[in-house]
Amino acid sequence: MEFRLIILFLAIMCAGGGCKTFPVSGNIDFSGSTLQRTLYLIEVKSFSSLASSFEGKVLDSAQFDVKGNFFFQNMPDKEGQNIYLLALQKPGEKFLTRLENENPLASNYLPFLYCPGDKVIIFSKALSMLKEVTIKSKIPENIVLQNLSRKRVEWYQQYFLENKSADEESHIENEASKLNYQKVILNFVKEEKNIYVQSMALRWASPAGDYERLADEVREVCTKLKVYDPEHPWTNQICVKSTSLPPVTGDVFPHIFFPTSDYDSISIKKLLATKLTLVDLWASWCAPCRKENKQVLVPLWDQFHKKGFEIIGYALDSSEKGWKAAILNDGADRWKHFSHLKGDESPVFETIHMTMIPANFLLDSRGVIVAKNLHGESLKKFVEDYFRS
């Protein structure tokens, strides 16, 4: 089918005499779409601006013929491969670089790689530019981008639309679905060496640029790109980003001090258990945290504490009364709890570059992070397996 489309397109372009070829051309099916019939070529200048609304630069625009064919006669003569976006806009849209990222099913743009001398042919549908995109090019990574684009839509439907719950106490399950979605995107390009493919996956994993839950993955991409493309400016941008994220698995947990009731402080090193310690980051007002206290942490503590398991609770609270009441009500008074009672201004959260709860870190007897952000059955299984080994 794709081959027939290409032959048809070339026949149209060659009709009436000399055959013209263009660096970038293709066809967009506008069936059922109300988007404008103007296609914008957008240049991307940094990692953070990739797939980010209002940050790209419009280089050119192309009009469609009645059958949806388009072409760009001139492309930048920049050395080597570069990534560009093609975008459609709604009627009356003032910002020509607006990109739909909330819902990949309704994406109004698609990425592609171009190298001077290449001929890129692109087919898609205006209703969902990513869902059925086809890219023909001499650059093999364009096929990876094509498949990643299609898979992004498929995974969004699988992890978001099919598993989404409006119940506040289902927050952990929803976050788990989101994290699985993000990780499957990154795993899809795990073996790829191309910086633009790796960058596109990172940006699509979190279009808002929030990588707090993906610190391990960002660190891994940074490490790979230092080998594959160390001189590219985006490598440095990604690696700088990784330094502002929480500690990752394999790191020694930061040497932090918790405030005590006698206005002193205690080092986390003095609180570590002989085998496994869970640093639990929570708050009395966090419904999923409270649910986890009762249904997961209490049973785990009861079962494994005498075998060398400890829990350290640190709360993002501002009310001492509410915090202590929650501890008692949840049966969480079995283990030690700390809080600076400064709410979002917590110095502990600032030190470990975190903002979101519920969250946790599992530390071995030396304080090395062996796992993080495990909840529910995943947390139970990890602890059980750890003590079984």
Image: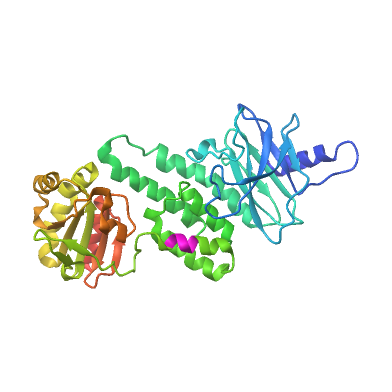
Q: Position of residue 287 (x, y in %)?
A: 22, 41
Residue 219 magenta: no
Q: Is residue 160 above or below residue 297?
A: above
Q: Name the image quarter holding the N terminus.
A: top right
Q: Does 370 sit left or right of 206 as displayed? A: left
Q: Does 185 sit left or right of 124 as displayed? A: left
Tell which of 169 and 350 is nearer to you: 350
Does residue 192 show up?
A: no
Q: Position of residue 277 (x, y in %)?
A: 20, 64
Residue range highlighted in magenta: 238-242
Quadrant assignment, res 82? bottom right
Residue 240 magenta: yes
The outermost residue toward the bottom is 366
Does residue 122 show up?
A: yes
Q: Name the image quarter holding the C terminus.
A: bottom left
Q: Position of residue 17 (x, y in %)?
A: 91, 39
Identify the residue at horizontal 55%, vertical 60% (top origin): 234
Tell which of 117 and 191 is nearer to you: 117
Identify the residue at horizontal 53%, vertical 35% (top origin): 106
Q: Position of residue 69 (x, y in %)?
A: 74, 36
